[in-house]
Image: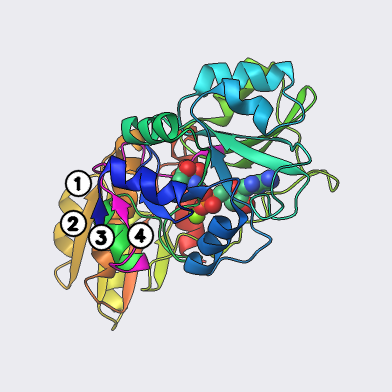
Amino acid sequence: MLVDTKQAIVLLKQGQVVAIPTETVYGLAADASNDKALRQIYAIKQRPADNPLIVHIAAASQISDWAAEFPPLAQKLAKAFWPGPFTLVLPAKPHVSLIVRGNQPTVALRVPSHELALQLLKESGLALAAPSANKFTQLSPTTASHVATSLGEDIPVLDGGACKVGIESTIVSVIGDDWQLLRLGMVSEASIETLAGKPALKNQVDLPKAPGQHLLHYSPKTPIKLFPSREALINYVKVSKKSCAALLIGEGEDIDKLPNCQHLTLSKQAMQAAKQLYSALHTMDAFNVEQLLVEAPPNAPEWLAILDRLTRAAH
Ligand code: TXA
Ligand code: MG
Protein backbone atom coordinates (compact mmCIF):
# COMPACT_ATOMS: atom_id res chain seq x y z
CA MET A 1 0.00 0.00 0.00
CA LEU A 2 1.66 3.23 -1.13
CA VAL A 3 1.58 6.22 1.22
CA ASP A 4 2.86 9.79 0.83
CA THR A 5 5.21 11.59 3.22
CA LYS A 6 2.38 13.15 5.25
CA GLN A 7 0.61 9.81 5.74
CA ALA A 8 3.94 8.15 6.60
CA ILE A 9 4.58 10.69 9.36
CA VAL A 10 1.09 10.20 10.82
CA LEU A 11 1.53 6.41 10.87
CA LEU A 12 5.03 6.59 12.38
CA LYS A 13 3.84 8.96 15.11
CA GLN A 14 1.01 6.52 15.90
CA GLY A 15 3.58 3.79 16.46
CA GLN A 16 2.99 1.98 13.15
CA VAL A 17 5.63 0.69 10.75
CA VAL A 18 6.25 2.22 7.31
CA ALA A 19 8.70 0.99 4.67
CA ILE A 20 10.85 3.93 3.62
CA PRO A 21 13.43 4.51 0.89
CA THR A 22 17.06 5.11 1.77
CA GLU A 23 20.00 5.42 -0.62
CA THR A 24 21.16 1.87 0.29
CA VAL A 25 18.02 -0.32 0.52
CA TYR A 26 14.40 0.19 1.66
CA GLY A 27 14.04 0.08 5.45
CA LEU A 28 11.09 -1.06 7.58
CA ALA A 29 10.88 1.99 9.82
CA ALA A 30 9.33 2.65 13.23
CA ASP A 31 9.75 5.19 16.03
CA ALA A 32 13.04 4.15 17.67
CA SER A 33 11.85 5.14 21.14
CA ASN A 34 8.52 3.27 21.01
CA ASP A 35 8.97 -0.35 22.18
CA LYS A 36 5.57 -1.43 20.89
CA ALA A 37 6.39 -0.11 17.43
CA LEU A 38 9.83 -1.76 17.54
CA ARG A 39 8.30 -5.15 18.41
CA GLN A 40 6.23 -4.94 15.22
CA ILE A 41 9.41 -4.66 13.15
CA TYR A 42 10.77 -7.90 14.62
CA ALA A 43 7.42 -9.66 14.19
CA ILE A 44 6.90 -8.61 10.56
CA LYS A 45 10.48 -9.48 9.57
CA GLN A 46 10.47 -12.69 11.64
CA ARG A 47 13.79 -11.44 12.93
CA PRO A 48 15.44 -12.88 16.08
CA ALA A 49 15.23 -10.50 19.06
CA ASP A 50 19.02 -10.47 19.55
CA ASN A 51 19.63 -8.88 16.14
CA PRO A 52 19.74 -5.11 16.80
CA LEU A 53 18.35 -2.36 14.55
CA ILE A 54 20.03 0.71 13.06
CA VAL A 55 18.64 4.02 14.37
CA HIS A 56 18.35 6.61 11.59
CA ILE A 57 18.74 10.24 12.63
CA ALA A 58 18.43 13.54 10.76
CA ALA A 59 21.89 14.87 11.64
CA ALA A 60 25.02 14.08 13.66
CA SER A 61 23.88 16.67 16.21
CA GLN A 62 21.33 14.07 17.43
CA ILE A 63 24.07 11.58 18.37
CA SER A 64 24.03 12.78 21.96
CA ASP A 65 20.40 11.65 22.32
CA TRP A 66 21.54 8.04 21.78
CA ALA A 67 25.25 7.53 22.34
CA ALA A 68 27.00 7.84 25.71
CA GLU A 69 30.28 8.64 23.94
CA PHE A 70 31.11 10.32 20.63
CA PRO A 71 34.90 10.01 20.43
CA PRO A 72 36.89 12.25 18.02
CA LEU A 73 37.43 9.36 15.59
CA ALA A 74 33.67 8.77 15.36
CA GLN A 75 33.11 12.51 14.86
CA LYS A 76 35.62 12.51 12.02
CA LEU A 77 33.97 9.54 10.30
CA ALA A 78 30.49 11.02 10.73
CA LYS A 79 31.67 14.28 9.22
CA ALA A 80 33.23 12.49 6.25
CA PHE A 81 30.45 10.00 5.45
CA TRP A 82 27.13 11.48 6.64
CA PRO A 83 24.61 11.76 5.20
CA GLY A 84 25.45 8.48 3.49
CA PRO A 85 25.78 4.69 3.47
CA PHE A 86 27.72 4.49 6.72
CA THR A 87 26.65 3.32 10.21
CA LEU A 88 28.43 4.01 13.50
CA VAL A 89 28.15 1.64 16.47
CA LEU A 90 28.78 3.50 19.75
CA PRO A 91 28.19 2.87 23.47
CA ALA A 92 24.47 3.47 24.14
CA LYS A 93 22.96 5.83 26.66
CA PRO A 94 21.17 3.83 29.38
CA HIS A 95 17.67 4.99 28.32
CA VAL A 96 18.04 3.58 24.77
CA SER A 97 15.51 0.76 24.31
CA LEU A 98 16.97 -2.73 24.78
CA ILE A 99 14.70 -3.82 21.95
CA VAL A 100 16.27 -1.47 19.39
CA ARG A 101 19.76 -2.51 20.46
CA GLY A 102 18.98 -6.21 20.76
CA ASN A 103 20.27 -6.20 24.37
CA GLN A 104 23.68 -4.89 23.30
CA PRO A 105 25.50 -2.19 25.32
CA THR A 106 25.87 -0.29 22.03
CA VAL A 107 23.58 1.46 19.55
CA ALA A 108 23.95 1.71 15.75
CA LEU A 109 23.35 5.15 14.18
CA ARG A 110 23.13 6.40 10.61
CA VAL A 111 22.18 9.61 8.80
CA PRO A 112 20.82 8.44 5.43
CA SER A 113 21.22 10.60 2.32
CA HIS A 114 17.92 9.83 0.55
CA GLU A 115 15.93 13.06 0.26
CA LEU A 116 12.62 11.51 1.38
CA ALA A 117 14.20 9.72 4.33
CA LEU A 118 15.78 12.98 5.49
CA GLN A 119 12.50 14.83 5.00
CA LEU A 120 10.66 12.23 7.15
CA LEU A 121 13.28 12.40 9.89
CA LYS A 122 13.27 16.20 9.96
CA GLU A 123 9.52 16.76 9.70
CA SER A 124 8.50 14.02 12.14
CA GLY A 125 11.19 14.89 14.67
CA LEU A 126 11.49 11.13 15.27
CA ALA A 127 14.54 8.88 15.12
CA LEU A 128 13.62 5.86 13.02
CA ALA A 129 14.77 2.32 13.64
CA ALA A 130 14.89 0.61 10.27
CA PRO A 131 16.27 -2.76 9.25
CA SER A 132 16.06 -3.72 5.59
CA ALA A 133 12.40 -4.20 4.63
CA ASN A 134 12.53 -7.91 3.85
CA LYS A 135 11.93 -11.15 5.75
CA PHE A 136 14.86 -12.41 7.83
CA THR A 137 17.70 -13.88 5.64
CA GLN A 138 15.98 -12.88 2.37
CA LEU A 139 17.04 -10.47 -0.36
CA SER A 140 17.01 -6.79 0.56
CA PRO A 141 14.55 -4.55 -1.36
CA THR A 142 15.79 -1.73 -3.58
CA THR A 143 12.37 -0.71 -4.97
CA ALA A 144 8.92 -0.22 -3.44
CA SER A 145 7.61 -3.26 -5.30
CA HIS A 146 10.35 -5.50 -3.82
CA VAL A 147 9.00 -4.55 -0.38
CA ALA A 148 5.48 -5.65 -1.33
CA THR A 149 6.82 -8.93 -2.74
CA SER A 150 8.68 -9.73 0.47
CA LEU A 151 6.39 -8.32 3.18
CA GLY A 152 2.98 -8.27 1.46
CA GLU A 153 0.73 -5.59 -0.02
CA ASP A 154 -0.59 -4.42 3.36
CA ILE A 155 2.70 -2.85 4.49
CA PRO A 156 2.58 0.94 3.98
CA VAL A 157 5.42 1.93 1.60
CA LEU A 158 6.75 5.38 0.80
CA ASP A 159 7.97 5.08 -2.80
CA GLY A 160 11.26 6.90 -3.32
CA GLY A 161 12.31 5.19 -6.55
CA ALA A 162 15.18 2.76 -7.01
CA CYS A 163 17.93 2.98 -4.36
CA LYS A 164 21.05 4.71 -5.70
CA VAL A 165 23.69 2.79 -3.71
CA GLY A 166 21.88 -0.55 -3.73
CA ILE A 167 23.61 -2.49 -0.95
CA GLU A 168 23.50 -2.03 2.82
CA SER A 169 25.63 0.51 4.67
CA THR A 170 29.18 -0.06 5.91
CA ILE A 171 29.02 -0.62 9.69
CA VAL A 172 31.91 0.45 11.92
CA SER A 173 32.12 0.22 15.69
CA VAL A 174 34.32 2.82 17.33
CA ILE A 175 35.93 2.11 20.70
CA GLY A 176 38.00 5.12 21.82
CA ASP A 177 40.45 5.70 19.00
CA ASP A 178 40.15 2.17 17.67
CA TRP A 179 37.68 0.88 15.13
CA GLN A 180 36.31 -2.40 13.86
CA LEU A 181 34.59 -3.16 10.57
CA LEU A 182 31.31 -5.01 11.26
CA ARG A 183 29.88 -5.00 7.74
CA LEU A 184 31.36 -3.81 4.47
CA GLY A 185 29.27 -1.59 2.19
CA MET A 186 30.22 0.87 -0.53
CA VAL A 187 32.16 3.06 1.93
CA SER A 188 35.48 1.23 1.64
CA GLU A 189 37.73 -0.07 4.39
CA ALA A 190 40.63 1.89 2.85
CA SER A 191 38.77 5.21 3.07
CA ILE A 192 38.06 4.63 6.77
CA GLU A 193 41.64 3.55 7.42
CA THR A 194 42.93 6.75 5.82
CA LEU A 195 40.77 8.92 8.07
CA ALA A 196 41.48 6.83 11.19
CA GLY A 197 45.20 6.83 10.52
CA LYS A 198 45.32 3.16 11.50
CA PRO A 199 43.96 -0.19 10.36
CA ALA A 200 40.84 -1.83 11.80
CA LEU A 201 41.12 -4.10 14.84
CA LYS A 202 40.75 -7.68 13.69
CA ASN A 203 40.05 -11.13 15.10
CA GLN A 204 40.10 -10.21 18.77
CA VAL A 205 37.70 -12.37 20.75
CA ASP A 206 36.58 -9.57 23.06
CA LEU A 207 35.49 -7.27 20.20
CA PRO A 208 31.81 -6.57 19.59
CA LYS A 209 30.28 -8.41 16.66
CA ALA A 210 27.33 -7.48 14.47
CA PRO A 211 24.91 -10.14 15.69
CA GLY A 212 23.02 -10.07 12.39
CA GLN A 213 25.89 -11.17 10.20
CA HIS A 214 24.66 -14.72 9.64
CA LEU A 215 26.40 -16.60 6.90
CA LEU A 216 23.06 -17.30 5.23
CA HIS A 217 21.76 -13.86 4.30
CA TYR A 218 20.60 -11.73 1.40
CA SER A 219 19.23 -14.88 -0.22
CA PRO A 220 16.81 -15.29 -3.08
CA LYS A 221 14.39 -18.24 -2.79
CA THR A 222 16.13 -20.05 -5.66
CA PRO A 223 19.42 -21.74 -4.67
CA ILE A 224 22.51 -19.80 -5.84
CA LYS A 225 25.85 -21.14 -6.98
CA LEU A 226 28.85 -18.81 -7.18
CA PHE A 227 31.55 -19.53 -9.78
CA PRO A 228 35.13 -18.25 -9.64
CA SER A 229 35.13 -17.45 -13.36
CA ARG A 230 32.75 -17.17 -16.31
CA GLU A 231 34.50 -20.13 -17.90
CA ALA A 232 33.72 -22.31 -14.87
CA LEU A 233 30.09 -21.15 -15.00
CA ILE A 234 29.76 -21.95 -18.70
CA ASN A 235 31.34 -25.38 -18.24
CA TYR A 236 28.83 -26.10 -15.50
CA VAL A 237 25.86 -25.07 -17.68
CA LYS A 238 27.05 -27.50 -20.38
CA VAL A 239 26.75 -30.49 -18.06
CA SER A 240 23.99 -29.45 -15.64
CA LYS A 241 20.55 -30.96 -16.18
CA LYS A 242 18.76 -28.38 -14.02
CA SER A 243 17.05 -25.28 -15.41
CA CYS A 244 19.04 -22.16 -14.63
CA ALA A 245 19.54 -18.43 -14.99
CA ALA A 246 22.96 -16.77 -14.92
CA LEU A 247 24.16 -13.44 -13.55
CA LEU A 248 27.29 -12.22 -15.31
CA ILE A 249 29.61 -9.28 -14.77
CA GLY A 250 29.82 -7.31 -18.04
CA GLU A 251 28.86 -8.43 -21.54
CA GLY A 252 31.01 -10.81 -23.54
CA GLU A 253 30.81 -12.95 -26.65
CA ASP A 254 30.97 -16.17 -24.66
CA ILE A 255 27.44 -15.43 -23.37
CA ASP A 256 26.18 -16.99 -26.61
CA LYS A 257 27.47 -20.30 -25.30
CA LEU A 258 24.56 -20.35 -22.86
CA PRO A 259 21.59 -21.18 -25.13
CA ASN A 260 19.71 -23.10 -22.43
CA CYS A 261 20.26 -20.55 -19.67
CA GLN A 262 18.76 -17.05 -19.53
CA HIS A 263 21.15 -14.44 -18.28
CA LEU A 264 21.34 -10.93 -16.86
CA THR A 265 24.47 -8.82 -16.76
CA LEU A 266 25.73 -6.41 -14.14
CA SER A 267 27.89 -3.41 -15.01
CA LYS A 268 31.67 -3.88 -15.09
CA GLN A 269 31.86 -0.87 -12.84
CA ALA A 270 31.46 -1.79 -9.15
CA MET A 271 29.33 1.18 -8.03
CA GLN A 272 26.93 0.65 -10.89
CA ALA A 273 26.86 -3.12 -10.28
CA ALA A 274 26.01 -2.61 -6.57
CA LYS A 275 23.03 -0.52 -7.60
CA GLN A 276 21.83 -3.27 -9.97
CA LEU A 277 22.62 -6.32 -7.80
CA TYR A 278 19.47 -6.94 -5.71
CA SER A 279 17.13 -5.95 -8.53
CA ALA A 280 18.82 -8.49 -10.79
CA LEU A 281 18.52 -11.20 -8.12
CA HIS A 282 14.84 -10.33 -7.48
CA THR A 283 14.19 -10.57 -11.25
CA MET A 284 16.02 -13.89 -11.57
CA ASP A 285 14.20 -15.29 -8.53
CA ALA A 286 10.92 -14.67 -10.39
CA PHE A 287 12.12 -16.78 -13.38
CA ASN A 288 11.25 -19.86 -11.31
CA VAL A 289 14.24 -21.85 -12.48
CA GLU A 290 15.94 -24.52 -10.35
CA GLN A 291 19.18 -22.65 -9.78
CA LEU A 292 20.81 -19.24 -10.14
CA LEU A 293 24.42 -19.23 -11.32
CA VAL A 294 26.57 -16.21 -10.55
CA GLU A 295 29.95 -15.19 -11.93
CA ALA A 296 32.18 -13.94 -9.08
CA PRO A 297 33.18 -10.26 -9.41
CA PRO A 298 36.77 -9.17 -10.07
CA ASN A 299 39.23 -9.61 -7.22
CA ALA A 300 39.56 -5.88 -6.39
CA PRO A 301 38.77 -3.82 -3.27
CA GLU A 302 35.82 -1.94 -4.81
CA TRP A 303 34.05 -5.27 -5.42
CA LEU A 304 34.50 -6.70 -1.90
CA ALA A 305 31.09 -5.62 -0.55
CA ILE A 306 29.36 -7.17 -3.57
CA LEU A 307 31.37 -10.37 -3.18
CA ASP A 308 30.36 -10.47 0.51
CA ARG A 309 26.63 -10.30 -0.37
CA LEU A 310 26.97 -12.92 -3.13
CA THR A 311 28.94 -15.28 -0.89
CA ARG A 312 26.24 -15.08 1.80
CA ALA A 313 23.44 -15.41 -0.73
CA ALA A 314 25.11 -18.59 -2.03
CA HIS A 315 25.77 -20.10 1.40
O1 TXA B 1 21.94 0.38 4.73
C1 TXA B 1 21.50 -0.06 5.79
O2 TXA B 1 22.19 -0.17 6.79
C2 TXA B 1 20.02 -0.46 5.82
C3 TXA B 1 19.18 0.80 5.66
C4 TXA B 1 17.71 0.53 5.80
O3 TXA B 1 19.61 1.77 6.56
N1 TXA B 1 19.70 -1.14 7.03
C5 TXA B 1 20.11 -2.41 7.29
O4 TXA B 1 19.62 -2.92 8.48
O5 TXA B 1 20.82 -3.06 6.55
P1 TXA B 1 19.70 -4.45 8.88
O6 TXA B 1 18.91 -4.56 10.12
O7 TXA B 1 19.29 -5.29 7.73
O8 TXA B 1 21.21 -4.66 9.23
C6 TXA B 1 21.72 -4.00 10.35
C7 TXA B 1 22.94 -4.67 10.87
C8 TXA B 1 22.66 -6.03 11.48
O9 TXA B 1 23.64 -6.95 11.03
C9 TXA B 1 22.82 -5.76 12.97
O10 TXA B 1 23.26 -6.88 13.65
C10 TXA B 1 23.84 -4.63 12.99
O11 TXA B 1 23.47 -3.84 11.91
N2 TXA B 1 23.74 -3.85 14.22
C11 TXA B 1 22.74 -3.04 14.60
N3 TXA B 1 22.96 -2.54 15.83
C12 TXA B 1 24.13 -3.04 16.25
C13 TXA B 1 24.89 -2.93 17.45
N4 TXA B 1 24.48 -2.20 18.47
N5 TXA B 1 26.06 -3.60 17.53
C14 TXA B 1 26.47 -4.35 16.51
N6 TXA B 1 25.79 -4.52 15.35
C15 TXA B 1 24.63 -3.88 15.22
MG1 MG C 1 19.03 -6.87 6.41
Colour scheme used in the picture? Answer: rainbow
Label 3 to label 1: alpha-carbon separation: 37 Å
Residue at the spot of label 2: 255
Mark 1 or mark 4, which has the lower sequence index?
1
* Callouts 1 and 2 close, C-beta under 8 Å: yes
Q: Which mark is residue 294?
A: 4
Using the image, determine if residue 26 lies above or below residue 188. Answer: below
| Secondary structure type for disc 2 | helix
Q: Amino acid at mark 1?
A: Glu
- Nearest the viewer among 33 and 236 is 33
| Secondary structure type for disc 4 | strand
Using the image, determine if residue 57 lies above or below residue 4. Answer: above
Residue at the spot of label 3: 1
Mark 3 or mark 2, which has the lower sequence index?
3
The magenta region covers 151-170
Q: Which mark is residue 251?
A: 1
Q: Residue at x 63, y 27 (%)?
A: 63
